[in-house]
Image (spheres, rainbow, N blue to C red):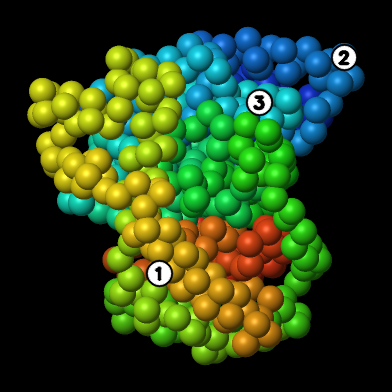
Amino acid sequence: MMDISALLTTGSARAIGEAIASGKLTSVDVTQWYLDRIKRHNNGANGLNCVRSVSSLALEEAKQADAELTAGRVRGPLHGVPYLVKDNVFTTDGSFASAGAAALAEFVPPYEATLITHLREAGAVLLGKTNLTEFADFVADIMPSEFSGAGGVVRNPLGRQYGRGQGSSVGSASAVAAGFCAFAIGSETQNSIQAPAVHTSVVGFKPTVGQVSRHGLIPLVPSQDSPGPLARTVDDALMIFQAIAGPDMNDTATLADFSGDARKVEDLHGLRIGVPRRFIADNLATHEHQTMFNDLLNTLSRAGAVIVDHCDLPAAEELNAVRSCVFRSEFHESLNVLLARLQPCGMTSMRDIIEWNNAHPEAIPYGQSLLEAAVETPGVCSAQYLHDRRHDVALSLYNGILAALEQGSADILLSPMTVAAKCTGKAGVPVVAIPAGADTEGVPFGVTVYGAPGDDLAVLYAAQAIERVIGQRVLPNAWLAE
């Protein structure tokens, strides 16, 4: 007999989709189950507060999905499967899109994001929106990742705090781990999918920049922004990526030629895994995590992988030290373009946001130092910006990831936790975060798998093989078991 609670709280999106497609469950039943669970565990003094709003159309979409299945129309493996999406993504279900900012708390988008259209076409059911770190963690340099002016504090179902620098897709990661949805959509500029995934013990995938359209997302750094899934397995991440990826004339970055090697890896035998140590793995905070990582490498080696250790980035030291105006410049100009065009909540520029915050200091208890720095930064046509962007790419990609892959004849690179996030973000490459247990203090541990731009499928296939050997999720607190 099927354990429905276990399937919906810890099972894969693929398994949930198969149960719906086979008639063992209906999409309506699954959707209502998740809505009820969100109602029980999201709000209140002990609630996770990872879901900002639920869609008024969720049950209607689920009924439509069931009707299509009854009529013999199967859209694919996500047909009828409920999901949540980060609150910087536009939807047309009547819900707000605030990017976590109190100044935009009641902004209703006039159109839906391309990735939402793709998921709707795949038959997935939109449950609602997840809270995120305000403006993707670019408001104040002391603000913890758990906080936003619009959404408040997001709690980690593993009982730990989302501290400073743990990525902005915290609501999406928390919701997946807590069993509030089958999968969720987040977005990453440098750290915002992989860090919440690692710290919440779920899988996260940030595609190559341009593989998934950003049309209908509130931007941070367009040269680095990339939406992607948070899920319970790498297989789910691959399945969701295939549903949301593709060219979009509304985001010309998606028109690039992504023709990476997509050779499927059935197991680890012969897979060459490069390990960047200098200023990457060497940056791990604790000796215990160093030991755990080395033990995982030994396990992968025994399973047949060829561990290329060291497989260092030639520019690792320079990249570790580099400071750039790219974030500030692109955030200021890209947000200004969106605000001037849509004028959400009467905001027409970043200066309007800053002035609104000054008039409502309770909304910014950590200040707004990063916003204030961004508004004063040189523009994207300035010599400083052009130099910094070229320098970022040279260090992270050409003298970084690509050079390490070539020099080590490696298929992919592997790092512990999120120590490679600065490099992978600036390089715009695909990254998969895989949970791998916890340390003696209960801190979730994980690894990130990454490779060359456009090699998304190759990286995902390699991550699947790695997950089968060392993947280990830490499950949420017992009170979430009901």
Q: Is residue 125 above or below residue 131?
A: above
The CA distance from mark 3 to mark 2 is 22 Å
Residue depth check, mark 1 versus mark 2: number of the one nearer the observer: 1
Counting residues from the start of the chain, the first of labels 1 and 2 encountered is: 2
The answer to whether the residues at label 1 and label 2 have Cβ atoms under 8 Å apart is: no
Q: Is residue 382 above or below residue 129?
A: below
Q: How many marks?
A: 3
Residue depth check, mark 3 versus mark 2: number of the one nearer the observer: 3
The CA distance from mark 3 to mark 1 is 34 Å
Q: Is residue 357 above or below residue 219?
A: above
Counting residues from the start of the chain, the first of labels 3 and 2 encountered is: 2
| Residue 187 placement, left or right of 24 | left
Q: Quadrant of the N terminus?
A: top right
Question: Where in the figure is residue 460, as x and y percent of width and height?
Answer: 67, 59
Question: Where in the figure is residue 97, as x and y percent of width and height?
Answer: 41, 23
**Residue 323, can we see it?**
yes
Q: Is residue 366 above or below residue 464?
A: above
The residue depicted at 84 percent of the width and 26 percent of the height is 74
- Looking at the picture, tell me which residue is in the foreground, 333 or 356: 333
| Residue bearing mark 1 | 419
**Residue 15, can we see it?**
no
Question: Where in the figure is residue 50, as x and y percent of width and height?
Answer: 37, 33
Residue type (three-letter) at the residue carrying disc 2: Ala
Residue type (three-letter) at the residue carrying disc 3: Thr
The answer to whether the residues at label 3 and label 1 have Cβ atoms under 8 Å apart is: no
The residue depicted at 58 percent of the width and 80 percent of the height is 403
| Residue bearing mark 2 | 71
| Residue 325 placement, left or right of 425 | left
Q: Dot 2: what SS?
A: loop
The CA distance from mark 1 to mark 2 is 49 Å
- Looking at the picture, tell me which residue is in the foreground, 241 or 428: 428
